[in-house]
Image (spheres, rainbow, N blue to C red):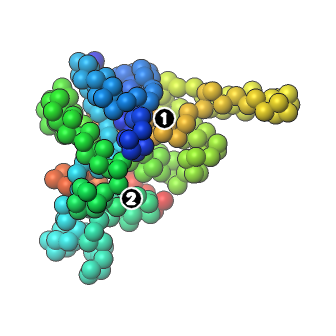
Amino acid sequence: MHTTFVGIDPTSGNRPVTYAALDSNLHLLSLGMEDFNEVMAFVAGLPQALVAVSAPQRPNQGLMDSSEVRQRLSPQPRPGRWTNFRLAEYQMRQHRISCPRTASREKDCPGWMQMGFTLYRRLEGLGFKPYPEESLFQWIEVYPHAAFCALLGQRPFPKTTLEGRIQRQLVLYEENLNIPDPMRFFEEITRHRLLTGTLPYDDIYGPRQLDAVVSAYTAWLTGNYPGRVTFLGDEHEGQVVLPVPELKQRY
């Protein structure tokens, strides 16, 4: 009952990390951008937490190069194809959800992925365990773009556009998160505001904030309603959790 559900988005690389925290009633406890160490200090101070990180857990472990793994897939990938992808990444792409590819060597991964690897190591140092291991402190891997595809049932508008931000915030609001209703943006647009360029952007979250919030929401669903989430990939290589019980064939 006292678990805090945290979403952390390290995709900015060495810049401040965006994070969001929800309580058990989907109230937004915190939403901000902080230095990496400050975010870790925030997490370390929680009495119980489930943290969702929007980055791969570790480099590609080569599962898609295993004939045994490939034979279990349906449809089976063609020989020589998809061998440099993680299993979770292959599965997302089969649903037409675009995602970055994780290299097999840490030094070959982009900076934000390397920061993600460091983040997982720091969480483990704080006593966090991968879900569903029994612990007061757990973590999961998420991918915000795939989460929004799953919640919307289609690929969303680009996240850097105003319509993409409103769309993402609206689907989270419809999931009963206690966040501002983004449709109020349209109610507050007046002739004067348009002429003076003072549009009411304050209640519309930015792209990285929305990624952090949907990550925290996925953690909340995982902790409270595990039957309403889908796991892709292999637990030894890294599973991605999506906030729906079943995926559409294609997005």
Q: Quadrant of the N terminus?
A: top left
Q: What type is the residue that disc 1 sits on?
A: Gln
**Total marks drawn?**
2
| Residue 172 as seen in the image, left or right of residue 43 | right
Q: Mark 1 or 2 closer to N-term?
A: 2
Q: Secondary structure at mark 2?
A: loop
Q: CA distance from mark 1 to mark 2?
A: 20 Å
Secondary structure under tag 1 reads helix
- Image check: 171 left or right of 215? right
- Residue 226 in percent (x, y) is at 28, 38
Question: Dot 2 surroundings within 10 Å: few (below 14), some, or many (20 or more)?
Answer: few
Compared with residue 91, is residue 173 higher up or lower down, i.e. above or below? above
Mark 2 is on which residue type? Pro
Check disc 2 and report the residue beneath it.
100
Indicate the quadrant where residue 49 lies: top left
Q: Quadrant of residue 15?
A: top left
